Image: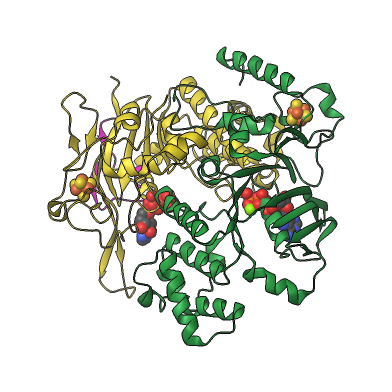
């Protein structure tokens, strides 16, 4: 339904060109959930904004790539067509919930306006639909809440309203950028449950951006792991969690404190800092932090190669080499030799 | 068992809500509402709970940034609430705080070296100042050259290291860590957690470690207090809490944490809490959790459960609930 092909989104800045999205390809089908994970600054939000064509341009530009939605390249269509797609076909929940609701308008009016911007309906019909949507997203007493202002809603409730607004045009694809990061875990559980039930009801394809691998495990069908503007591994949720052949993904999973593991085990962090997207390391971008790096990694910038059906990873190590390095690493970790 | 270093006795912190500046308050935000806790020499007490439950407020009363509305705080057995300015100043040596936000907690116009030296200067410990700063940088895994850099030249994890070095400058006995890793990327969180563990061992420090992430707390704490609306709901040694929690709120929190394991995650039952956090200005009557508790009974609306031991075998495990029970919905290791 939606296919991203070799997309590049570069951003010109005073200090140089930020290669925020660098040759990214993936596709998503109806009813499917794809999670995009990666650390801060890896390009997740810029990628999401690119799909919606929301990056201010200039400074952002696309030296290459296609965003195919139902056969049309969104990079080529008119502004008018784009506006129709945005919201009606693809809609987005933004990372910062406070900034996306207007504090001076009543929640009901914002919702009704969103509905009327997608469909030519009477105010009355729009209000009826607004009530339906608020009920859909689990807001109690929706009739009364229509008259409230955003500050009268808790963080979780605001996120529900944003989901309602995003659903107003009955989109086929919903992009949610860290929709639960600012929320408490018990509220996060409610929101993820809500997204799942909406997907079931309407067959919506969901692209969910998060840095929480627990959320990914809970909700994803397929996963894209991003590092310094690239996809470094992609596959089914089990490929990523149980059969990863990419040192970054593997070390990330290995570094997490978790409630289902023995607390006396020392954590194994990834050394160093995320790379800088203007001046990226030579060779493999993960090389300065990679526990498995070899000399060759300084020279070769690995591209994605297929490791199993639908499972791709960007690393020069063969599966066997990766496995051996992993064994060796675990042995050293046991001995406490890994700091 | 080691000596108690810090004892909190029925601490309450009520913030007045005023409609007009000079008028009498119309109500109070009951941010901390009767908390009693003991932290022993060398141990780590973890405090968890959702946003707004009073964790930071409690931390600020301990370091003397806020004076509690009632209750008592003992440090090394002595009540510190009656301390005068000079005594409070002296106490700063022993109790230090590390803040959540590595971006705003450092003065952007000061070099890292100056930031770390500031507490030493405040206590006129300026002999060998540079050496001490280098030593502290080294302790937290930064380089000597880093002393000359400004905060914006460091990453989040490195800035948090500067905050830790500053807190360690005076050789404190107790560190209050308010969400020290929450703002950091997962790949960097583990670095800082390991550093804190090493420092504790090397320097014999005692920690109060605040977080909303139960996985981080499990990793670092010996003993955990679970807070809800200004009160402690469950208190226990960490092992027992993560395997045999009994309070419905703790159970719900543990069951809500997504595990980075798709198979476990998809088999798992979840306890969904209904509704939202009530306002701390008007907390529910009886058990404050009753509006969201999946097993609340009529009587829970009237009577207040006290935090007490519920199974005779473990005096370290205390629960504030009339119907404490373990549940299958939480996951334990292996
Ligand atoms: N308008 C802009 N001008 C310049 N650089 C930008 C702009 N927007 C984003 N960037 C840069 O692009 C890179 C990717 O940013 P992006 O916001 O996509 O990261 P992210 O993966 O969403 O991170 P986070 O997890 O923190 O939300 C970053 O290095 C960021 O600084
Ligand atoms: N100075 C103040 N005046 C009035 N109310 C306050 C003040 N400081 C905190 N509060 C309120 O007290 C309650 C507890 O706040 P606190 O910051 O201690 O929570 P917290 O557990 O640290 O939350 P978080 O996880 O979001 O940091 C909140 O309802 C907060 O709004
Ligand atoms: S290519 Fe080399 S540096 Fe890059 S992930 Fe693989 S082993 Fe590590
Ligand atoms: S006392 Fe009642 S309402 Fe409170 S936690 Fe226990 S069962 Fe729930
Ligand atoms: Mg982002
Ligand atoms: Mg706080």
Looking at the picture, tell me which residue is in the foreground, B85 or B47: B47
Looking at the picture, tell me which residue is in the foreground, A281 or A203: A203
Q: Is residue A262 left or right of residue B315?
A: right
The picture places residue B92, in percent across and down from the top left corner, at 42, 38
Looking at the picture, tell me which residue is in the foreground, A90 or A268: A90
Q: Is residue B272 magenta?
A: no
The quarter of the picture where the N terminus of chain A appears is bottom right
Rendered view: A133 above or below B212: below
Q: What's the residue at 35%, 31% (across, down)?
A: B242
Q: What's the residue at 80%, 41% (across, down)?
A: A280
Observer able to see residue B175: no
The quarter of the picture where the C terminus of chain A appears is top right
Q: How many marks?
A: 0
The answer to which quarter of the image holds residue A312 is top right
The picture places residue B169, in percent across and down from the top left corner, at 52, 32
Magenta stretch: give its range. B61-80
The picture places residue A185, in percent across and down from the top left corner, at 43, 48
Q: Is residue B62 magenta?
A: yes
The answer to which quarter of the image holds residue B281 is bottom left
Rendered view: A143 above or below A246: below
Q: In the picture, which chain is yellow?
A: B
Q: Is residue B201 left or right of residue A64?
A: left
Q: What colour scheme has been applied to the protein in the rendered image?
A: by chain
The picture places residue A124, in percent across and down from the top left corner, at 46, 86
| Chain A painted colour | green
Q: Is residue B5 left or right of residue A294?
A: left
């Amino acid at each position: 339904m939606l296919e991203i092909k070799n997309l590049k989104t570069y951003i010109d800045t005073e200090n140089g060109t930020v290669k925020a999205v660098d040759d990214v390809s993936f596709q998503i089908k109806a009813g499917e959930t794809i999670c995009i994970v990666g650390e801060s600054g890896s390009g997740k939000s810029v990628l999401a904004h690119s799909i919606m064509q929301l990056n201010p341009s200039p400074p952002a530009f696309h030296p290459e790539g296609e965003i195919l939605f139902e056969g049309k390249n969104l990079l080529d269509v008119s502004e008018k067509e784009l506006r129709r797609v945005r919201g009606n076909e693809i809609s987005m929940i933004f990372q910062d919930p406070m900034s996306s609701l207007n504090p001076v308008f009543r929640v009901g009016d914002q919702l009704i306006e969103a509905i009327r911007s997608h469909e030519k309906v009477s105010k009355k019909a729009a209000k009826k639909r607004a009530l339906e949507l608020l009920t859909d997203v689990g807001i109690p007493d929706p009739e009364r809440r229509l008259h409230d202002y955003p500050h009268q809603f808790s963080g979780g409730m605001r996120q529900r309203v944003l989901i309602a607004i995003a659903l107003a045009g009955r989109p086929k694809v919903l992009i949610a950028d860290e929709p639960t990061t600012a929320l408490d875990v018990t509220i996060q559980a409610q929101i993820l449950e809500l997204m799942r039930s909406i997907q079931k009801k309407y067959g919506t394809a969901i692209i969910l951006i998060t840095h929480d691998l627990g959320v990914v495990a809970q909700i994803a069908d397929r996963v894209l792991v991003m590092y310094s503007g690239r996809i470094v591994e992609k596959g089914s949720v089990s490929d990523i969690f149980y059969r990863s052949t990419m040192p970054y993904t593997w070390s990330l999973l290995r570094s997490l404190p978790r409630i289902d593991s023995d607390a006396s085990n020392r954590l194994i962090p990834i050394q160093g800092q995320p790379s800088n997207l203007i001046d990226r390391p030579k060779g493999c971008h993960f090389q300065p932090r990679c526990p498995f790096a070899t000399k060759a990694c300084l020279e070769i910038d690995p591209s994605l190669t297929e490791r199993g059906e639908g499972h791709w990873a960007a690393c020069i190590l063969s599966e066997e080499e990766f496995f051996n390095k992993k064994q060796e690493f675990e042995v050293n970790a046991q001995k406490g030799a890994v700091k | 068992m080691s000596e108690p270093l810090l004892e909190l006795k029925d601490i309450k912190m009520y913030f007045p809500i005023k409609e007009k500046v000079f008028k009498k308050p119309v109500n109070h935000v009951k941010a901390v509402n009767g908390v009693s806790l003991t932290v022993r020499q060398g141990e780590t007490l973890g405090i968890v709970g959702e946003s707004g439950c009073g964790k930071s407020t409690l931390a600020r009363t301990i370091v003397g940034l806020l004076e509690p509305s009632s209750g008592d705080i003992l440090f090394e057995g002595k009540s510190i609430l009656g301390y005068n300015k000079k005594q409070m100043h002296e106490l700063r040596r022993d109790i230090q705080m590390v803040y959540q936000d590595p971006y705003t907690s450092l003065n952007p116009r000061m070099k890292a070296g100056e930031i770390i030296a500031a507490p030493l200067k405040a206590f006129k410990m300026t002999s060998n100042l540079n050496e001490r700063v280098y030593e502290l940088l080294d302790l937290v895994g930064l380089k000597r050259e880093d002393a000359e850099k400004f905060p914006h030249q460091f990453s989040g994890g490195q800035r948090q290291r500067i905050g830790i070095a500053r807190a360690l400058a005076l050789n404190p006995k107790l560190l209050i860590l308010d969400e020290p890793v929450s703002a950091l990327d997962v790949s960097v969180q583990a670095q800082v957690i390991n550093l804190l563990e090493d420092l504790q061992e090397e320097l014999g420090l005692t920690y109060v470690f605040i977080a909303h992430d139960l996985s981080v707390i499990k990793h670092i704490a010996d003993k955990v207090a679970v807070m809800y609306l200004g009160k402690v709901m469950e208190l226990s040694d960490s092992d027992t809490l993560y395997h045999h929690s009994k309070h419905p709120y703790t159970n719900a929190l543990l069951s809500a944490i997504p595990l980075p394991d798709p198979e476990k995650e998809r088999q798992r039952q979840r306890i969904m809490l209904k509704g939202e956090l009530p306002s701390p200005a008007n907390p529910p009557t009886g058990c404050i959790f009753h509006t969201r508790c999946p097993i609340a009974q009529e009587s829970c609306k009237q009577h207040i459960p006290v935090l007490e031991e519920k199974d005779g075998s473990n005096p370290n495990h205390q629960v504030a609930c009339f119907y404490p029970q373990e549940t299958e919905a939480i996951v334990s290791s292996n």
